[in-house]
Image: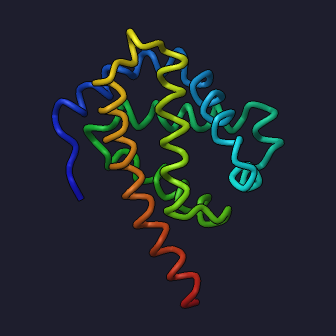
Amino acid sequence: MTQLTADTIAIVKATAPALRKHGVEITTAMYARLFQDASIKDMFDQAAQESGEQPKRLAAAILGYAENIDKLQALDGAVARMVQRHVETGVKAEHYPKVAEALLPAIRDVLGAEVATDAVLNAWGQAYWFLANILIGKEAQAYEDAEAA
């Protein structure tokens, strides 16, 4: 797996204050885009969406990732919980591009093109896929383990 570049890490870390301030707005906009696909919407607990709990949880996770992108071992527990939840809800590798296609435009929509420049979105795209590939690998192993049990 390709490691993140120093530039990508620096850009993502530099966005942490904006994420702290606007994270829930970004994740709410992301879910609005994502849920245009009814098959994906059906995978989510709609009560957690309507209460705002799920957008808050995802915003906190994204902020945690941004703040710890240079020390990913600090996220081991969060990654394990995400993998467990994703396996419980049937998340598969083919869902990750749809999330990226919803998240990155939501970042630009909320922060504006002056803050969410092409360089920022490119860095977040790289960071997203770096983490997504970790999750996809761990989820594939969890699915295999569940089938073998």
Left of 120 or right of it: where is 101? right
Q: Position of residue 61 (x, y in %)?
A: 51, 38
Q: Position of residue 9 (x, y in %)?
A: 25, 33
Q: In this view, does 59 lie above or below 132?
A: above
Give the residue at x 40% y 47%: 75
Q: Please name whichever residue, 57 or 110, is drawn nearer the observer in this view of the structure.
A: 110
Left of 50 or right of it: where is 75? left
Q: Position of residue 28 (x, y in %)?
A: 66, 29
Give the residue at x 49% y 62%: 93
Left of 135 or right of it: where is 86? right
Q: Is residue 11 above or below residue 113?
A: below
Q: Position of residue 48 (x, y in %)?
A: 77, 41
- Looking at the rendered image, the quarter that the C terminus falls into is bottom right
Give the residue at x 40% y 66%: 137
Give the residue at x 24% y 33%: 8
- The number of callouts visible is 0
Res 43 quadrant in image: bottom right
